[in-house]
Image: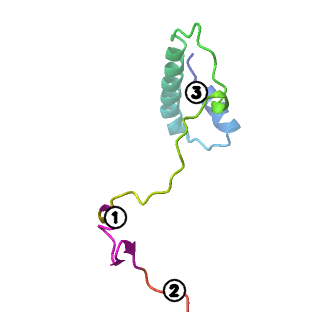
Amino acid sequence: MSLDPATIRRIASLARIRVEEHEVETLQTELNSILGWIEQLNEVNVDGVEPLTGGARMAMKMRDDVVTDGGYPEKVLANAPDRNGDFFAVPKVVE
């Protein structure tokens, strides 16, 4: 499928996008290349592939919800401007 300049202007009008006359040719080239990529997708063999309408039917991998400190406080606090032991030190903001 190839879009002509009149179709580009119509698309811009429907999308409420102002397109200057000198931009029409650039947009025509870009949209035609996008449509070319879509046409390439039509060549992919999808026989036997069930459509995926969302991730709701997928089982998520579960792991234990365990709180840890990460095990490497030196790496975490390496760029801290100020620290107090294994914690960030911040100025008091409430009096």
Tag 3: residue type?
Pro
Tag 1: residue type?
Pro
Residue matched to label 1:
73
Highlighted range, magenta: 75-89
Q: Nearer the viewer, residue 41 or 18?
A: 41
Instruction: Residue lying at the far bottom in this picture: please name it.
Output: 95
Q: Count neighbours of disc 2 (C-alpha within 10 A) and say few if under 14, some if 14 to 19, many if 20 or more.
A: few
The residue that appears at 63% across and 37% down in the rendered structure is 12
* Vertical side of 85 occupied by 9: above or below: above
The residue that appears at 55% across and 92% down in the rendered structure is 95
Mark 3 to mark 2 CA distance (whole Å)? 61 Å
Q: Position of residue 64 (x, y in %)?
A: 53, 45
Residue matched to label 2:
93
Instruction: Residue lying at the far right in this picture: please name it.
Output: 14
Residue matched to label 3:
5
Mark 2 to mark 1 CA distance (whole Å)? 25 Å
Q: Which of disc 1 and disc 2 is earlier in sequence?
A: 1
Q: Secondary structure under badge 2?
A: loop
By secondary structure, the bulk of the magenta-drawn segment is best described as loop
Mark 3 to mark 1 CA distance (whole Å)? 61 Å
Q: Quadrant of the N terminus?
A: top right
87 left or right, relative to 57: left
